[in-house]
Amino acid sequence: MLDQELYAAIVTTVAKVLLVSPDHISPSTNLETDLGADSMDILEILFRLERQFGVDIALPVWEAASVENLARYLQEHVHQTAPATSEF
């Protein structure tokens, strides 16, 4: 089960970087095929999440293509209950 606060933070970051409505994002949303993200967009999302959660994301870009993959990775690696800061 995905942590809802973590999921919401990811959705907010993805929406801001890709300039899409959070309503268009679900756990199964693929950043590339569903939202048109390119590798630079995905890297920007990863960098922002790293800063926000204070964790290095060692997830290959191709594995980070879905919101659920990002959420599961962060859920396993973030040792806090809420995002540290709000970015951008």
Image (cartoon, grey):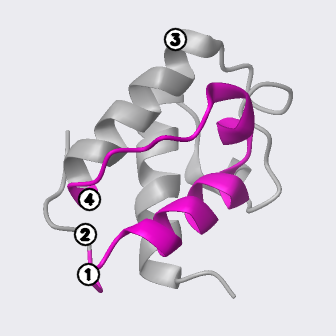
User: Relative to the observer, which residue lies in front, 75 or 41?
Assistant: 75
Q: Distance of mark 4 from mark 2, alpha carbons? A: 6 Å
User: Relative to the observer, which residue lies in front, 22 or 4?
Assistant: 4
Residue at (65, 12) in percent of width and height: 38
Q: Position of residue 30 (x, y in %)?
A: 79, 40
Query: Which mark sits nearer the N-terminus, 4 or 3?
Result: 3
Q: Which residue is mark 2?
A: 83
The amino acid type of the residue labelled 2 equals: Pro
The amino acid type of the residue labelled 3 equals: Met
**Magenta residues, start to end:** 53-82
Q: Distance of mark 4 from mark 3, alpha carbons? A: 20 Å
Q: Which residue is mark 1?
A: 80
Disc 3 crowd rating (10 Å Cα; few below 14, some 14-19, many 20+) is few
Question: For residue 40, which numbered disc appears in the image?
Answer: 3
Do the residues bearing badges 1 and 2 touch, measured as CB atoms within 8 Å? Answer: yes
Residue at (53, 83) in percent of width and height: 3
Quadrant in which the N terminus appears: bottom right
Q: Which residue is mark 4?
A: 53
Residue 54 highlighted magenta (yes or no): yes
Q: Position of residue 66 (x, y in %)?
A: 73, 46
Helix, strand or loop status at disc 3: helix
Do the residues bearing badges 1 and 4 touch, measured as CB atoms within 8 Å? Answer: yes
